[in-house]
Amino acid sequence: QQQVKQSPQSLIVQKGGISIINCAYENTAFDYFPWYQQFPGKGPALLIAIRPDVSEKKEGRFTISFNKSAKQFSLHIMDSQPGDSATYFCAARWGGTSYGKLTFGQGTILTVHP
Amino acid sequence: EAGVTQSPTHLIKTRGQQATLRCSPISGHTSVYWYQQALGLGLQFLLWYDEGEERNRGNFPPRFSGRQFPNYSSELNVNALELEDSALYLCASSSRLGYEQFFGPGTRLTVL
């Protein structure tokens, strides 16, 4: 059972465009929602994160929108650049008795054309 | 500030052997998490250590085990290796009770 569903699997955007990646979750025990960026041959790097009591968080060109009632959250990359080409993972952190571990979405391969 | 470090970078083993992977957390972090990133399966949670104790483990067989040392570094051991254990093994660290997990570069384990 996939706890966090991510879409699309791949995304192609022109330079300067907006990249949007969506995630949906089922379990209300999740208490923290980070996004990670991973380049080939590297470990995932924490990009931006949000807690469920906040509806939006912006850091530079990256924005998370969070809809608690719909159990959905998304990453928006404004003014996308070729250097943003990477795999992006959404994740959800367990609270309660499974406290601490992250459950990841399947990833989105983003390609930004110059 | 140095990030999470892992060794070795690559490890090649044959089926049935044992593998040992090592991780050093960010200075000041006491929690270490291990994840498996296998092709087509995404990132799967393996183990969490904090203050030397195993706090949680994922849906993996007991031949996946580990420990955390007094200096908070950690070791992941995989016994009786199987072909499907081939994957990138990632270590992450956080401060105690911290939400943010920071990943290392990973160890690529290949089982032949």
Image: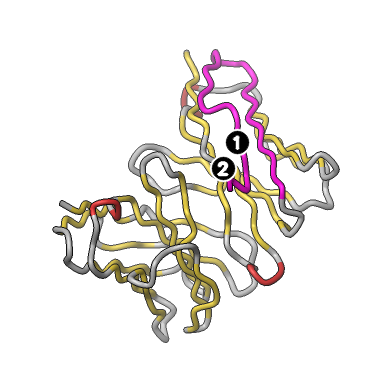
Q: In which quarter of the image is residue A65?
A: top right
Say what secondary structure mark 2 lies in.
loop
Note whether B95 is above or below B88 in the view shown: below
Note whether B51 is above or below A73 in the view shown: below
Pointer 1 chain:
A
Examine the structure image and report whether residue B83 is included in the region drawn in magenta.
no
Residue B70 location, x and y as percent? 42, 86
Residue at (41% x, 79% y) in the render: B68
Say what secondary structure mark 1 lies in.
strand
Which numbered circle lies on residue A65?
A: none
Badge 2 density bin: few <14, some 14–19, many ≥20, Cα 10 Å: many
Residue at (67% x, 48% y) in the render: A49
Residue at (60% x, 48% y) in the render: A91
Residue A74 location, x and y as percent? 69, 35
Segment tinted magenta in the rendering: A1-26
> Going from the N terminus, do you reach mark 2 or mark 1 first?
1
Residue A64 location, x and y as percent? 71, 38
Examine the structure image and report whether residue A13 is included in the region drawn in magenta.
yes
Can I make out residue B41 in this image? Answer: yes
Q: Main secondary structure of the magenta part?
A: strand
Residue indicated by mark 2? A105
Most foreground residue, B111 or A78: B111
Can I make out residue B1 in this image? Answer: no
Pointer 2 chain:
A
Note whether A106 is above or below B20 in the view shown: above
Badge 1 density bin: few <14, some 14–19, many ≥20, Cα 10 Å: many
Query: Residues under labels 2 and 1: Cα distance?
Result: 5 Å
Which numbered circle lies on residue A6?
A: 1
In this rendering, position of residue B110 left or right of residue A104: left
- The three-letter amino acid code for the residue at tag 2 is Gly
- The three-letter amino acid code for the residue at tag 1 is Gln
